[in-house]
């Protein structure tokens, strides 16, 4: 960007504040003179001219004082809008009050200082309208210069776009594009399904028609892309708009979510391509910040698996609540380094301590607890990939079961206030090693809740997370980027999905409201068919499903189900203080749980997959037959913990 472009035309660049004062005084004096001319039909008597010269300095002095008092000089003239208009209107009224007081309160011998009532009304109205008009004119000329200058410097033609949605967000986007010269966009108009808006003008651009007219409008105006400017559009609306844009051959983009805009994370003009998350229909999460603050603020918070998809987002969310110290426990040093650097840059005043360690290393975990004394532990470290754990059962036991037991027992031993376990929908009636290991982890926490009164143990269960490592969305993206095929396990497979940010926020809220021994279940909304997800992602990438990008059905992998569940029969699901968090009080672990758990841990090191599966079947009678695996024998009497040496 050139210096001239950044600063604007000469007269704008050199209109400093001192010059603005003089300019305003000139406007006020001119308006006062015009008021006298209008009052006397442009034939002002000599006596009134004399009085006007006496009154003008007093009137202008009062008006300038009101301008300063109302903060008008603090306004950034480039952003003068409707909010500032009311300040000018209030200043007009305030400036009239002392003049009216002088008009009716001065003694007769000071009559020459008494401004006529009609002059007061005319001048007070016109004076501040004039000051506002000068600022609007200045802004208009600056923006026009910026657009023309940037266009001439770049030498690149601007891309023609149409805005979908003529509501408040659409108006804001139009104002941003009009006021800036660096977007490379030119708006031809709006489309909106409200017939009352058709034909109206918004910042000089017309509402051209409805969504049904988009295809013909795109051809008529030579538009190349459409921008969805509806701040709170639901999934059905976005899907309909995307389909209409596809028919019109337009690239579809969308403004950021309302939450991001309100949080100041992005500008409303930071357009992005429509993502699969926009089509999920997830409502924005409403959190009780005070409750979470009481849970985390000024506390030492330990997050395990801090470098993973969920763990790193928990770190980001927790850092917002001002913990006294944030401890990041992770065994993958590269991932730990990345999240540590990110949080230090985002919150330089926060005390962050990265810790390389394995949750299954009891000596290392004990040393961390003894030295740093955390108040809250959020346990996100886990092996979560279903097919991978089918062939690595021993690692699932070590990380998901042994690691949880070690952390949980030490949390109780050190009197930690709260221990929050991140669980999964695959723990419900498990058909896989991974799901079974997480179900056992839930039972471990419930058993510890009965053992340690000082520590509150809460398990939080939810489904798939959009964009997490190993999840279906990044896999589909890679397959689409390679030209296909996109592989789907089964035509009827459905899954629950949630964004990483939403999951992390609700986990912290659940940790704050849960009672010891609770299994809290996040409301995942409606389940999504995987085939629909694949079709949507292909379409959003600009291809036609089955035609340009093939979809192949490869069959369910070991341990996978057609449909995941979020609750176990008999859990007595109940509401909590948050509408998106439900409570399932699971039945107590079986009496032989400790012996079975010990046998399971022995079978995991060295790993014996067949024995692991048989013990899981004994531990979890609700598990599905698929947990045993195709080649595993049925449970035997010898697998009773009393018979295991």
Image (spheres, helix red, strand yellow):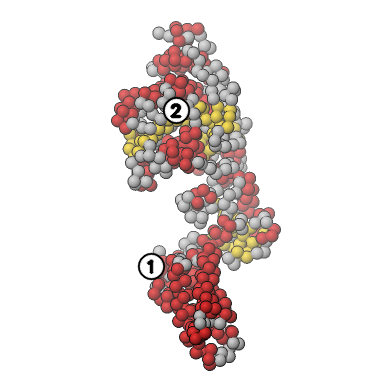
Secondary structure under tag 1 reads helix
Q: Is residue 375 visible?
A: yes
Q: In this rendered view, identify the residue nearer to me: 440 or 248.
A: 440
Disc 2: CA contacts within 10 A as few (<14), some (14-19) or many (>=20): many
Residue at 56%, 82% in the rendered image: 116
Q: Are marks 1 and 2 in contact (CB under 8 Å)?
A: no
For residue 66, side relative to residue 222 (left or right) = left
Q: Position of residue 626 (x, y in %)?
A: 55, 20
Disc 1: CA contacts within 10 A as few (<14), some (14-19) or many (>=20): few
How many labels, in total? 2
Q: Is residue 82 above or below residue 272?
A: below
Residue at 65%, 64% in the rendered image: 200
Mark 1 vs 2, N-terminal side: 1
Query: Label 2: which residue?
Result: 456
Q: In this rendered view, identify the residue nearer to me: 331 or 132.
A: 132
Residue 3 numbered mark, or none: 1
Q: CA distance from mark 1 to mark 2?
A: 60 Å
Q: Is residue 628 above or below residue 530?
A: above
Q: Position of residue 378 (x, y in %)?
A: 42, 32
Q: Is residue 43 above or below residue 521?
A: below
Residue at 36%, 23% in the rendered image: 413
User: Mark 1, mark 2: which one is toward the viewer?
Assistant: 2
Q: Position of residue 604 (x, y in %)?
A: 41, 18
The image quarter containing residue 85 is bottom right
């Amino acid at each position: 960007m050139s210096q001239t472009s950044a600063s604007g035309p000469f007269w704008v660049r050199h209109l400093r504040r001192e010059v603005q004062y003089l300019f305003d005084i000139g406007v006020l004096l001119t308006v006062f003179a015009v008021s006298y001319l209008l009052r006397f039909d442009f034939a002002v008597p000599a006596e009134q001219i004399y009085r006007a010269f006496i009154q003008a300095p007093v009137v202008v002095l009062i008006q300038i004082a009101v301008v300063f008092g109302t903060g008008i000089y603090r306004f950034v003239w480039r952003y003068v809008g409707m909010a500032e208009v009311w300040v000018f209107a209030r200043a007009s009224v305030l400036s009239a009050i002392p003049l009216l007081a002088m008009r009716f309160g001065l003694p007769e011998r000071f009559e020459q200082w008494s401004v006529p009532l009609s002059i007061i009304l005319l001048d007070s109205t016109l004076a501040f309208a004039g000051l506002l008009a000068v600022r609007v004119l200045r802004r208009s000329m600056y923006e026009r210069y910026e657009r023309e200058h940037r266009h001439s410097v770049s030498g690149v033609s601007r891309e023609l776009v149409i805005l979908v949605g003529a509501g408040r967000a659409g108006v804001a986007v139009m104002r941003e594009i009009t006021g800036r010269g660096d977007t490379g966009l030119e708006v031809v108009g709006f489309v909106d399904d409200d017939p009352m808006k058709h034909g109206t003008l918004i910042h000089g651009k017309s509402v051209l028609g409805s969504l049904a007219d988009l295809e013909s409008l795109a051809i008529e105006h030579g538009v190349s892309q459409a921008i969805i400017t509806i701040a709170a559009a639901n999934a059905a609306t976005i899907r309909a708009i995307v389909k209409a844009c596809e028919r019109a051959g337009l690239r579809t983009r969308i403004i950021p979510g309302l939450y991001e805009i309100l949080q100041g994370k992005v500008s409303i003009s930071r357009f992005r391509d429509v993502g699969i998350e926009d089509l999920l229909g997830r409502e924005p999460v409403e959190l009780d910040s005070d409750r979470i603050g009481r849970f985390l603020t000024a506390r030492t918070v330990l997050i395990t698996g801090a470098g993973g998809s969920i763990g790193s987002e928990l770190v980001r969310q927790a850092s917002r609540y001002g913990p006294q110290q944030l401890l990041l426990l992770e065994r993958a040093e590269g991932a730990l380094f990345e999240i540590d650097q990110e949080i230090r840059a985002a919150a330089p005043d926060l005390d962050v301590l990265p810790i390389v360690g394995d949750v299954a290393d009891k000596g290392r975990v004990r040393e961390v607890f003894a030295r740093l004394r955390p108040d809250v532990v959020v346990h996100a470290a886990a092996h979560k990939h279903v097919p991978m754990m089918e062939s690595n059962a021993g690692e699932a036991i070590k990380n998901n079961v042994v690691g949880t037991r070690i952390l949980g027992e030490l949390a109780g031993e050190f009197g930690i206030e709260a221990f929050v376990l991140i669980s999964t929908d695959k723990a419900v009636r498990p058909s896989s090693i991974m799901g079974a290991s997480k179900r056992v982890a839930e039972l471990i926490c419930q058993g510890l809740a009965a053992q340690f009164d000082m520590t509150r143990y809460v398990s939080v269960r939810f489904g798939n997370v959009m964009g997490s490592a190993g999840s279906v969305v990044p896999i589909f993206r890679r397959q689409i980027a390679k030209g296909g095929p996109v592989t789907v396990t089964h035509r009827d497979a459905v899954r629950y999905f949630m964004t990483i940010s939403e999951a992390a926020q609700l986990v912290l809220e659940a940790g704050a409201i849960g009672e010891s021994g609770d299994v809290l279940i996040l409301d995942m909304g409606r389940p999504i068919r995987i085939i629909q997800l694949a079709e949507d992602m292909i379409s959003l990438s600009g291809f036609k499903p089955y035609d340009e990008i093939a979809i192949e059905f490869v069959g369910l992998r070991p341990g996978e189900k057609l449909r995941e569940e979020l609750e176990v029969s008999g859990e007595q699901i109940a509401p909590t203080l948050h509408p998106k968090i439900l409570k399932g009080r699971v039945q107590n672990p079986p009496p032989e749980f400790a012996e079975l758990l010990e046998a399971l841990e022995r079978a995991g090191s060295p790993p014996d997959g067949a024995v692991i599966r048989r013990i899981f079947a004994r531990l979890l009678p609700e598990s599905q037959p698929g947990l045993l695996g195709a080649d595993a024998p049925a449970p035997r009497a010898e697998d009773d913990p009393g018979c295991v040496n």
